């Protein structure tokens, strides 16, 4: 069975420049734009913004 494109796999990259990423899924109907979340970056040991990259 094929994966549904309504919930694609996305990669969230840290804006701190450390190269740390999170991999998650998002719902395109609820979030059609690029996702920006504030999450913990273990390299700099603080919360920073993570932006969606495709």
Image (tube, rainbow, N blue to C red):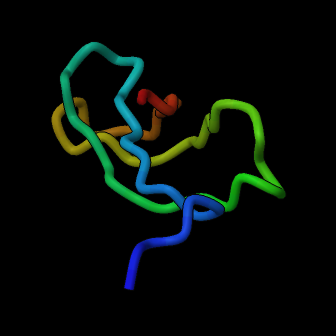
Location of residue 44 with respect to 22 vertically, above or below: above
Location of residue 1 with respect to 53 vertically, above or below: below
Q: Which residue is drawn at 43% across and 47% down?
A: 10
Location of residue 42 with respect to 19 vertically, above or below: below
Q: Residue lying at the far top in this picture: please name it.
A: 17
Q: Residue lying at the far right in this picture: please name it.
A: 30
What x and y, as percent, mark residue 51? 51, 29
What x and y, as percent, mark residue 46? 37, 38
Q: Residue at x 42, y 55 (%)?
A: 9
What x and y, as percent, mark residue 14? 36, 28
Relative horizontal placement of residue 44, taking residue 25 as reference (left or right): left
Relative horizontal placement of residue 24, taking residue 38 as reference (left or right): left
- Count of all numbered marks drawn on residues in the image: 0
Q: Residue lying at the far bottom in this picture: please name it.
A: 1
Corner quadrant of residue 37: top right
Relative horizontal placement of residue 34, taking residue 21 as reference (left or right): right
Relative depth, front residue between 1 and 13: 1
Location of residue 49 with respect to 30 vertically, above or below: above
Relative depth, front residue between 2 and 51: 2
Corner quadrant of residue 54: top left
What x and y, as percent, mark residue 3? 44, 72
Quarter of the image for the N terminus: give it.
bottom left
Relative depth, front residue between 25 and 37: 25
């Amino acid at each position: 069975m094929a994966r549904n494109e309504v919930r694609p796999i996305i990669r969230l990259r840290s804006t701190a420049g450390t190269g740390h990423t999170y991999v998650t899924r998002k719902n395109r109907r609820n979030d059609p734009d690029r996702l920006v979340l504030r999450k913990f970056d273990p390299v700099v040991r603080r919360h920073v913004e993570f932006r969606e990259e495709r």
